[in-house]
Image (cartoon, rainbow, N blue to C red):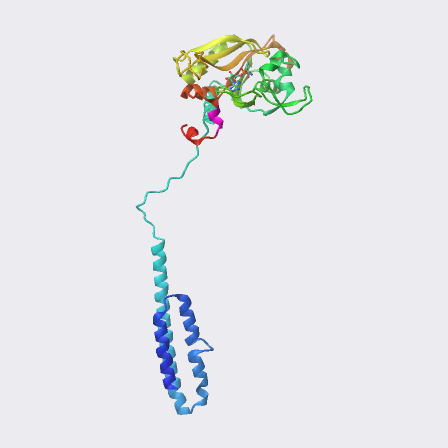
Amino acid sequence: MLEQLEELHTQALNELGKIDNIAELESWRVCYLGKKKGLPQILRSLSTLSLEERKRVGAKANEIKKSLELILTEKKRGLEEASVISLVDREKLDVTLPGRPIPTGRLHPITQTLEEICDVFKNMGFQVVEGPDVEWDYYNFEALNIPQHHPARDMFATLWIDSEVGEKSRLLRTHTSPMQIRIMEQSRPPIRVIVPGRTYRYEATDATHESMFYQVEGLAVDENITLANLKSTLFEFCHYLFGEETKVRFRCDYFPFVEPGVEVAIQCLSCHGTGCRLCAYTGWIEILGAGMVHSDVLKRVGIDPEIYTGFAFGLGVERIPMLRYGIDEIRLFYSNDLRFLKQF
Ligand code: FA5
């Protein structure tokens, strides 16, 4: 039996030498030191021996057991250390490598322009308000002196939501001017507001026309407001945005909800007035329509035109970055081409 123990000891040590991971080491432990196999099994058969032999074999078996337990602990520690070292090695960080840049978002050029426009008017004392994209026929047309069958409806090719005709028909607002009515219904003079927002028209697109575009509406109602106030406000705005030297053209125009009506254009910054694709070879780019609020409009919202007067304007937003950066194609703003958008 002593020989049997020696053999077991040698075999255990040989096998242990070949082990290089924790899972195999555990199998080895079960095999040689586990309760059912190996040494403990041999120790259980001691009862068949004489007292003398039992003492000797028992002492030897305990000695081997202790030696195997000791060597098992050492081997386990060694393997654990090796696995930590290899993990550290695999996950090692090279702190000298350059960091990965975090891609940051940016504001769309039209959003940037809207913010800039709002800032200019805020500095002049205007308040910013917003209105609904889906509008009633009443606000978009009727209340602005454009009743059913009025030829001015042709100026605004409309995307209708409801098919029935009448004040209660819904549409996608063709301009931000309906907000003039909503604001004057809700507040009394003095009024100074601007309304940035999306507008929609059912029209074929070209280099300077989109079917969805932004406008900023302006409205000022108070005592003694004159056309001179409108002109100075708009000139101030244009010079601030495009530079003091920029030529601004102020001409008569017709809109049923203002009297008189004007149109404001900027000399094309791309060709300096000689004519190019951006200005449709006219030398000028129209950026807004404006005028003095019509007395009928004031009466309709309960403001006395004998006491109060007002001016209003509606500015096309896309035309501004087009002029400033020489962009000759409005559709680029909404075609989601990152090569274009990343330049702003
Ligand atoms: C109007 O929309 C009037 N509501 C403006 C107004 C407001 C007049 C207050 C009087 C008082 P108009 O249709 O001209 O007007 O449009 C105003 C501006 O919007 C134009 O000068 C132009 O810069 C821009 N615009 C018009 N149609 C388009 C389009 N399809 N695509 C891009 N911009 C456009």
Residue 279 on the magenta segment: no
- Residue at 67% from the left image edge and 23% from the top image edge: 163
- Residue at 36% from the left image edge and 81% from the top image edge: 7
Give the overall secondary structure of the magenta segment.
helix
Total numbered labels? 0
The magenta segment is: 331-335
- Please indicate, yes or no, whether residue 21 appears anywhere in the rendered image: yes
Q: Position of residue 269 (x, y in %)?
A: 40, 16
Q: Nearer the viewer, residue 12 or 203?
A: 203
- Residue at 65% from the left image edge and 19% from the top image edge: 138
Residue 149 placement, left or right of 67: right
**For residue 92, above or below residue 158:** below
Q: Quadrant of residue 2?
A: bottom left
**For residue 109, above or below residue 285:** below
Q: Nearer the viewer, residue 12 or 339?
A: 339
- Please indicate, yes or no, whether residue 301 appears anywhere in the rendered image: no
**For residue 121, above or below residue 77:** above
Q: Position of residue 277 (x, y in %)?
A: 44, 17
Q: In which quadrant will I find the N terminus? A: bottom left
- Residue at 42% from the left image edge and 36% from the top image edge: 104
